[in-house]
Structures are given as structure tokens and as C-alpha cells.
Image (spheres, rainbow, N blue to C red):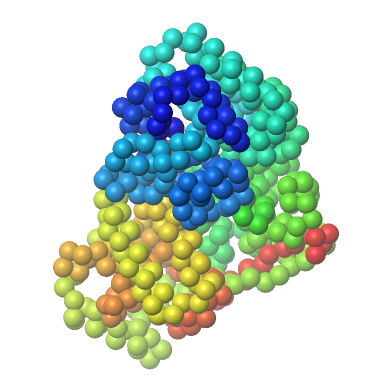
Amino acid sequence: MPANTDELAGAFVTPPIALPQLVPSRTCLQCDVCCRFPDPDSALRPYFTENEITLALAGGIEATAFPNQLGSQVILVPDPHGEGYLCPAFDAATSKCRIYEQRPLDCQLYPLALMWNELHDQVLLGWDTKCPFMREEIPAAIQRHADRVMALLDQPGVRDHFVAHPRLIGRFQEDVVVLALLSRLTEAVAGQWGTAPLHRFTLDDIPRMTTTLDQSGWRHAQSLAAYSPVYHYMWNGLLAYWWMELEGALCLFVQSPDGWFMPLPPIGAGPIDAPLCEAMRLLRRWNGDSPVSRVENVPSRLVPEFERLGYRLTPKEPDYLYRARDLASLAGDRYRSHRALCNRFEREQSFEMSSYQVGDRQDCRALLADWSRQKRAEGLESFGAMLLADAAPAHEVIWSQAAALRLTGKVVKIHGRLCAYTFRYWLTSRTFCVLLEVADRTVPGLAQYLFRETCRMAVAEGAEYINTMDDAGLPGLRASKQAYHPVMLIPNVAAFPACTS
Ligand code: SF4
């Protein structure tokens, strides 16, 4: 990960914690592995603690690079000269780290790596064979270096640092050669975070979550769009999602700037009492008495259970559900204005609609920036502007991972210029959800046309219902969703444990 700027082989670098370095900078400067990533949600992007964020900000890195100022993986930026993504501290022109002296511990460690074993019950120290230097170095020299690093990692202050920031311990990677088991660190992590393994939520976990959601029985044609992994996964660039098996249920946790919460109740086929009790015990341990401890997106069928268990229930913005044929045909007086706008777009524009390709990413990025400017110029309220800023990393994840997430994307080009895009997913075989829709607001009828065509395609594939998710409490969005005449507003509830109320 580190892009060296100085000859630091064998030297110690700057506080707060400084690790010895093995790889000489001349090797780093010739390599194109570190600090560059293929996808925006890469699990390997560096993690900065609160202190390290402060130092990075002082070194000129923008605050927007860190979604959680108390500690977070950095938000990557698109590589201006390639397809992938860069750490915002990386200077592509010189191949150097702009904050090398203040770079985080995560980067200092590399090409050593802290990771869990396959069973996720033991922390390991390994060396990453992706680093070309480590492929050539003799194992005895690597082991000597690792011993020096391990001695530092074993110091209580340093160990506490890793315990406080479990994201510094990565997932098991087959191409990392194991050098040592770190028993004391393992025990310390278990003491803080619980003995059940806490896993980062990655693309590999999507099949498991899908199967468990199917078994839960919550997912049906008229259920919340949140009962799909992609709904949560897209925020992984911004927030940190984790999961854990508790009492036979899959428990999803979100680490947000305010603290930890559950974006869904414990997912499983059995009763929720035991897993919910365990999950709340952990939230209390992680959050203290903060009211941030809560369960979001509680399905209606579980509401009596939560009431019985003494939770305080608060209604949230509902999802909008439409009959798919209504939106595909836009027939009748109530859709007259939508129909007129679609007709105007078809009449006035020379355009083509096609499937999204990953090569469209750059154009989508430019469109999102324009669209955000247009929205702000229209006088977007501050909460809406904040949501818009947060949306960019989520869109990056979608553009990059659409195929892996089984999302269907469509783009509209006018005279070859990409002017609109949309992504959707199937919640069940009868309901599809519109995840994103962005259309140049200066082109009359474009948004209405794209939405109608998306609905028509879904109907042709068997959709009965269309879920466009909630309105985030934004009056403008609410009015435009209401204007399409939903057949149902799907209730959404958040549950707060009584003791933190
Ligand atoms: S902080 Fe510096 S060393 Fe670490 S990934 Fe970013 S550019 Fe590379």
C-alpha cells in the first residue's frame, strides 16, 4: 500500500505509531500495485484512525475523503488516466504519497498484513505476495522484519489501537503467506467485539444474505426494498457494514459516524428473541447508552414481536409501491402530464437507449456531477444537498459492481452524449425496485421517458409491482412520487430498545 518518498528501509517513521519499513522506496516507485485499486469499494483501501485523519487533513487531504472522522476507510477517487481508483493521497504524476510522513498505520504495515484466518477466529500476520519486492525477498529477512513488527504490535498501546479499529484486521486472503498467529491480539479483539466472528460485509456475502432473507419470509411482492443485499451493499463505500451469526440468525450491523445500529432485524427463519437480545447486548457494548442503538426496516409482521419485547417503535418514510402496468402505460387523465412529457421527449430528441456498460462509468460520473449542480441551483434544501453529496460514493459502487450485484442498468444518449442512467433490481419475481435514476434536468421529458421505458421493460419481464423506495423526507421527491399514484405506501418502522429511550 505505501508509496514511499524517502529512503526508509529499516528506519522508523512518524508517530502516533511508527513501524519499521522493509521495502526500499526505489522499489516502491517502480511498482504500480500500491495505492491503486480496481473498484471503489475495495476492501484493501487504507483505513485511517481519528488521529491519522487529523494528520491527513493537515497534510492537505480533503475532509470528504473520510466519511467517518472517528475512523474510516478512505473514499477512493477515480483514476483520471485509467479505469480504476486511487487513494486521494496518491500523486499519480510522481507515484508518491502526498502524506508519506503521516500515512496511516494500515499503510505502514504493508506489505505485511493483519488478517483473520479462514474460520475467522484467529488474527494472523502475513506477507502479501502481491508486493513484487516480497516475492523476491528471502523468507528469513521477511521473518526478521515481521518479528520486529510483531514486537511493536504486542505493546499494549499498539494492541489497543487495533482493538479500537477492527477494520485494520482484514479478511483472510489466500495470496498472503502466514507468518504468525497473534493470540494476544485475538483475545483482546474478542474481549471488545465479542467471541462470535464479526465479518466485513463484502460481495462474497451476498449469496448468504440472499438465502437467509428468502428463509426469513419477509421478502414478498409488497415488502420493503431494504430486503435485498444490494440496497445495503451500495453504501459500503461510505459506511462500514458488518455481519455476524448470532443464535442462528444473520445480524447485519452498520458502523456510522454516530455509532452502530442494525439496518435490518436479525435475519433467519426462527424466533428473533434470542438473536435480537444478543445483538442489542453488543450494540450497548459498542455504543454505550447512545440512542443510536436501533433496528431499522422492521417488517410489519415483526412489529408485534418488537412491541412484546418492549421496543419503542417509530414510523419512518414508507416505500412507494406502484402497479407496474399503470406506469408502463401511463393511461388516463391522471397521467396526462407524464404522458405529454414522454411524447415531447420522443418528438424533440434524437436519442438511443442501451444497456449500461462499465465503459459508461466516466460519462455517468460527469452526468452525476452536472445533475448535482442542477439540483443545487434549483435551491435544494440542506438535507437534500447532504444526501446528494453522500450519494456519489454509492453511485461509484454501482457503476463499478453492477454486474456482480446483478443490477440492470440502462443509459440514454442524445447525439452520443450520455444524458440519463438508471439501475434496478428484482426484489422478488413480481416486484422490481428502482435503485437509482439520474437524468439531465435541462432535457424536458427525459426523466419521465426513462422511467416509463424502464417500467415497460420490467412489465415485459413479468413485473406486477414497481417499488421506488422512500422519499427520504424530501418534499419535492414526495410530490413527484405521489404524482405517479402509488397503490400502496409500504410501512417502515425503526425499533429502539426501551433502555436507551
Ligand atoms: S495514504 Fe499514502 S501510502 Fe497509503 S494508500 Fe494512500 S497514497 Fe498510498
Q: Is residue 144 above or below residue 436?
A: above
Q: Quadrant of the N terminus?
A: top left
Q: Ligand 1 shows up in which quadrant of the image?
A: top left
User: Based on the displayed image, in which of its 4 quarters is residue 412 positioned?
Assistant: bottom left
Q: Relative to residue 120, is residue 390 drawn left or right?
A: left
Query: The C terminus lies in which quarter of the figure?
Result: bottom right
Point out residue 494 in the picture as x, y percentages from the top left corner. Answer: 68, 64
Q: How many marks?
A: 0
* Residue 405 drawn at (x, y percent): 42, 49
Compared to residue 116, the image places residue 377 above or below, namely below
Q: Is residue 195 visible?
A: no
Q: Position of residue 335 (x, y in %)?
A: 38, 86
| Horizontal relation, residue 47 to residue 332: left or right | right
Give the residue at x 75% y 57%: 290
Residue at position x 41%, y 28% from top?
6
Q: Residue at x 41, y 89 (%)?
A: 334
Q: Position of residue 478 (x, y in %)?
A: 51, 79
